Image: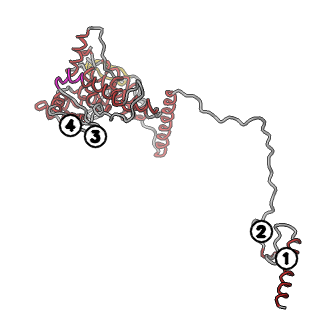
Amino acid sequence: MAASSLATRASAGKLIANALIRSRPSSTTLLPSVVSNAHQRALHSSAPNAADVSPFSAVGPPPEAPQPAAEHPYAKIARRRKQAELLRNAKEIRKAEGAGKSTTPLKRRFWQHVYVKEAEGFYQIYLDSRPLRHPTTKEIVNVPMTKPLLAHALALEWDLLTSAQDATKQHLIPLTSIICRAVDIAADDAANSSDADFAPIRTSITTMVLRYLDTDSLLCWAPPPLDPPAEGEETLREVQERTARGIIGYLSTRVWPGVQIEPVLDEGSIMPKRQQEGVREVIQGWIMGLDAWELAALERGVLASKSLLGAVRLLVEWSEGAAGRPARELLSAQGPASKRKYGIEEAARAASLEVDWQTRKWGEVEDTHDVEKEDLRRQLGSVVLLVSGTKSQ
């Protein structure tokens, strides 16, 4: 009896539930037994508005994506320099206005004309009526009469400056800085004429450049490749060996006769080895015997190329002093039609063998490799201008 009563109640409950579901007006209406109207809450207080969709009236295919205009690399560099100059000038003007001061004359170019004048047996550079002076000693910068190209290049350097403030930036006055360096070496030698071997500037430069002998870029060769190269293609090591042999052969026969210079890295080694006994002493004595102009040029060439041997090769080829005597003797023996065989391009290529080899293989990074390439040639060009002259012609 109890079982039949429970079954009757269950079937009655199912009928009532089905009737309630069928009587529901929509899918969003809740059963009164579950949620009452008093418990419902609106999510916003304003009445909903229908979306106003604008009709699509375009005709034809979509426009193409904008493409950058072709621009010459030199035009891009000039444009960026001009933008940088405008930004710098605007920053200086704002800074002066914020401090309540007007721009000083040093921020502008206070000279109109630059010219070379012969005075007291030297070339002197004049900014209007003012001679160019050493920034520290305030002495007039004198260029020897045997170096007319250097004097006119120095005048051109100052004629290209746009303000007196640019003269404080070393990268804008490479010739001025290297000439003043040579003047300082000459003054230091004169002050220590009784014992020139212990002149502070000369000794410090010699010690510094000799450090490059143990890690010279011409003597650090890449290991042989694991995979054989393609037919007719040179490996990096073969290029390094060919370039180094030409320079070392010239120095070992004409500059330091009998001196044997060897590579500083063995295959599979990362620690450089020192040269044979006596090699360092011969090279040190030769460097200490250079005149002030040659020593300043050697310092600039070593720092720019990271190679003592490459800098010496360039110095010997173009110096009008005692260091250039082997090159002059070779030119006179070859006849009047002979030309110099080692210049700025050759020295730059020897100093950047690995970079050039890698960029030919993998490509060049814009505004990095090209800037470094031109800066290296600019530095080596200042070396040639400093040591060359009418005596070497």
Q: Which of marks 2 and 3 is nearer the N terminus?
A: 2
Q: Which residue is drawn at 85% across and 72% down?
A: 21
Question: What is the C-alpha distance between the residues marked 2 and 1?
Answer: 29 Å
Which of the pair 20/28 is nearer the observer? 20
Q: In which quarter of the image is residue 17?
A: bottom right
> Any mark on residue 269, and which?
3
Question: What is the C-alpha distance between the residues marked 2 and 4?
Answer: 87 Å
**What residue did someone put label 1 on?**
17
| Circle 4: residue type | Arg
Q: What is the crowding at mark 4: few (fewer than 14 residues within 10 Å), some, or many (at least 20)?
A: some
Q: In this view, does 77 lie to the left or right of 309?
A: right
Instruction: Name the mark nearer the viewer: 4 or 3.
Output: 3
Q: In this view, does 156 lie to the left or right of 118?
A: right
Q: Residue at x 43, y 31 (%)?
A: 359
Which of the pair 380/387 is nearer the observer? 380
**What residue did someone put label 2 on?**
42
Spot occupied by residue 172 in the image (x, y as percentages of width and height): 38, 31
Give, as a single range, the part of the protein colored magenta. Answer: 249-258
Q: What is the crowding at mark 1: few (fewer than 14 residues within 10 Å), some, or many (at least 20)?
A: few
Question: What is the C-alpha distance between the residues marked 2 and 3?
Answer: 79 Å
